[in-house]
């Protein structure tokens, strides 16, 4: 990391499920967070789910969506139906992005983060 060439950089303990590696720099206020270019290195701590703008439920950035909530709700799903569905979908969350991508039915991951909601 180039920062270490010019500054005294200390690793910070990041919160579980943090999307960045965090550091402090001696004699500077605040901290610096770096999001790894290869995000699957942080999968083991991920506790996130996403719902895209079209209503697709995603357990992982690398899956192709596991359920269309919009259509489910439009068909009259109750709050209890949604709760049961969410619990069942989250139980299926893959261990990491490699597994999620391998299980895709629509090819390799290629969505823009703006369409995914990330």
Image: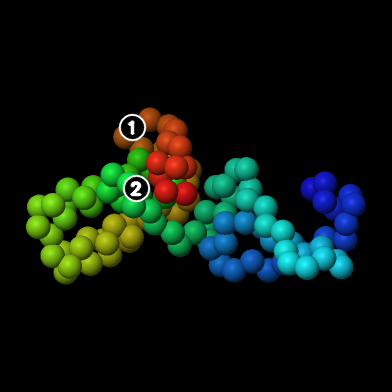
Q: Residue at x 67, y 57 (%)?
A: 33
Q: Earlier in the sequence, mark 2 or mark 1?
A: 2
Q: Residue at x 63, y 51 (%)?
A: 35
Q: Residue at coordinates 78% horizontally, 68% vertically from top-left?
A: 29
Q: Nearer the viewer, residue 117 or 82?
A: 117
Residue 89 quadrant: bottom left
- Image x and y of residue 21, in percent: 67, 57
- Residue that mark 1 sits on: 106
**Residue 23 spot, x, y in % from top left:** 74, 62
Of marks 2 and 1, the one in the foreground: 2
Residue that badge 2 annotates: 52
Residue 109 % position (x, y): 43, 35
Figure colour scheme: rainbow
Q: Nearer the viewer, residue 84 or 91?
A: 84
Q: Residue furthest right?
A: 6
Question: 99 left or right of 45?
Answer: left
- State how far apart marks 2 and 1 are (Cα): 16 Å
Q: Residues within 10 Å of mark 2 (few under 14, many from 20)?
A: some
Q: Is residue 4 above or below residue 80?
A: above
The residue positioned farthest toward the front in the image shown: 29
The spot of residue 61 in percent (x, y) is: 44, 46
Q: Residues within 10 Å of mark 1 (few under 14, many from 20)?
A: few
- Asked if residue 20 can be seen in this view, the reply is yes
Q: Residue 55 shows which numbered tag? A: none
Looking at this view, is 10 or 90 the one in front?
A: 10
Q: Tag 2, which secondary structure?
A: loop
Disc 2 vs disc 1: Cβ atoms closer than 8 Å?
Answer: no
């Amino acid at each position: 990391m180039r920062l270490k060439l010019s500054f005294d950089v200390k690793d910070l303990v990041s919160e579980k499920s943090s999307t960045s590696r965090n550091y402090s720099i001696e004699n500077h206020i605040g901290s610096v967070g770096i999001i790894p270019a290869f995000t699957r290195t942080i999968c083991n701590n991920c506790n996130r789910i996403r719902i895209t703008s079209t209503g697709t439920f995603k357990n992982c950035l690398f899956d192709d969506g596991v359920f269309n909530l919009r259509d489910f709700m439009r068909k009259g799903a109750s709050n209890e139906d949604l709760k049961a569905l969410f619990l069942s979908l989250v139980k299926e969350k893959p261990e990491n992005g490699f597994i999620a991508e391998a299980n895709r039915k629509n090819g390799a991951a290629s969505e823009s983060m703006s369409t995914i909601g990330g």
